[in-house]
Amino acid sequence: MKYAHIVGWGAYLPEKVLTNDDLARMVQTSDEWIFTRTGIRERRIAGEQETTATLAFEAAARAIQVADLHPSQIDLIIVATSTPEYVFPATASQVQDYLGAVRAGAFDLAAACSGFVYGLDMAAQAIATGSIHTAVVIGAETLSRVLDWEDRGTCILFGDGAGAVALKGSSVPGGLLSSTLRSDGSGADLLTLPAVYHNPVPMLGPEYLRNGHDKNTIAMNGRQVFRFASKVVADSIAVVVKKAGLEMEDIDLIVPHQANSRIVESAAKRLKLPKEKFFLNVHRAGNTSAASIPLALCDAIAADKLKPDDNVVFVGFGGGLTWAAAVVKWQVTPPEVSFVDREWRRARYIYARGRSRLRKFGRKIGARLLGSPIPDARLRDADKK
Ligand code: UT7
């Protein structure tokens, strides 16, 4: 039996900050309304040259640096995202190329804001069965590109960013102790982002479009999602703690999806836990969907909230509806990373980009010289005659 331990972590937030006051100049809202209703003060917005894949790469590169892994040691890359540039290629394949992770499999995972916990579970189970030894699980989003900037009910909530963890198999007991993955598709219409290539009418009906949701932007029934979230956060934490054979007192830290600090307060009340048990960074990053849990985890580590042997719970919820939770035994201390090591790794990624370009070029030349790989059937038939 192998245990899947988190051995590295990394976060990346774009530079550009959008404050509540900035938003108040764009839609009818105020810093006071946003902060008291959500706990958000500011969020980050991706630059023109940044994509979900570049954000994901930055977070993953940091995670494998902390884990002291060479890119060629990575067996699997999972990117949880609702904002890929393409349906295919997967964002994960772009990240694989940027990292030069030449032996890795890669795929994207769509479970909205629960995606990171789903990905963590998938990777950990693959490690536990021995099918792989190492994995990088990333949550990455550029939600600013799919927001209706005239809808004050949603545009004030979301932000861009990426967070990642590196996982490694070990015979030392610990790592992922338990998990639960759930979905209730009857609530699909409560939180939606239609795909560009597909008319959403068949699933959600004409009433959905009459409500103004006729664009490829996020639409949400905030009150209903709030009610659902407060319940499932508390319920799923209780489920995974029990599954891990632990009591609530054994839990040292809960890192929830960062949607709204009031959801966390309500879940804490249901579980009769002090709200200090929950780590929040929603004030500075907003709701970054699949990226929010690993981003908050990195901030929690930076704030010294985790030490070896602590039990930490991750809990996500969102579109689908989906929700998921996991208990992880924390067993690592942040290593010192030297300047030389950091620069050496950067150089390696420049080499990976060069190698990727060379492969592209090689493919082009090969196609010119060799022509079609399919034998021309007509010519063959003519030869026979
Ligand atoms: O990551 C996916 C999961 N997503 C979530 O968990 C989000 C869950 N929902 C929420 O966080 C909250 O429902 C919101 C923050 C989105 C909204 O808070 P609320 O307390 O549920 O507000 P509400 O929708 O009930 O609206 C209350 C009032 C309304 O005005 P009236 O009808 O009472 O006059 C809204 O029009 O607040 C108004 N309002 C705003 N006012 C100022 C809605 N948005 C804004 C705004 N600024 N940005």
Image (cartoon, rainbow, N blue to C red):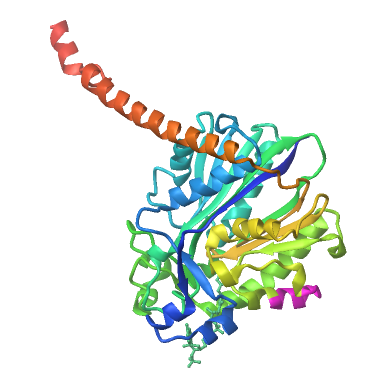
The residue positioned farthest toward the top in the image shown: 384
Front one among 327 and 64: 64
**Quarter holding the N terminus?**
top right
Side (left or right) of 314 relative to 34: right
Residue at image coords 67%, 69%: 232
Q: In the rendering, at what x and y percent does residue 329 appear?
A: 78, 50
Side (left or right) of 365 relative to 51: left
Front one among 292 and 322: 292
Asked if residue 72 lies in the magenta stretch, the reply is: no
Residue at image coords 46%, 75%: 154
Asked if residue 266 lies in the magenta stretch, the reply is: yes
Residue at image coords 39%, 49%: 87
Q: In the rendering, at what x and y percent does residue 255 appear?
A: 69, 62
Front one among 181 and 82: 82
Q: In the rendering, at what x and y percent does residue 70 appear?
A: 59, 32
Q: Which residues are magenta?
A: 265-274
Q: In the rendering, at what x and y percent does residue 247 appear?
A: 87, 61
Q: Quadrant of residue 185?
A: bottom right
Can you see residue 4? yes
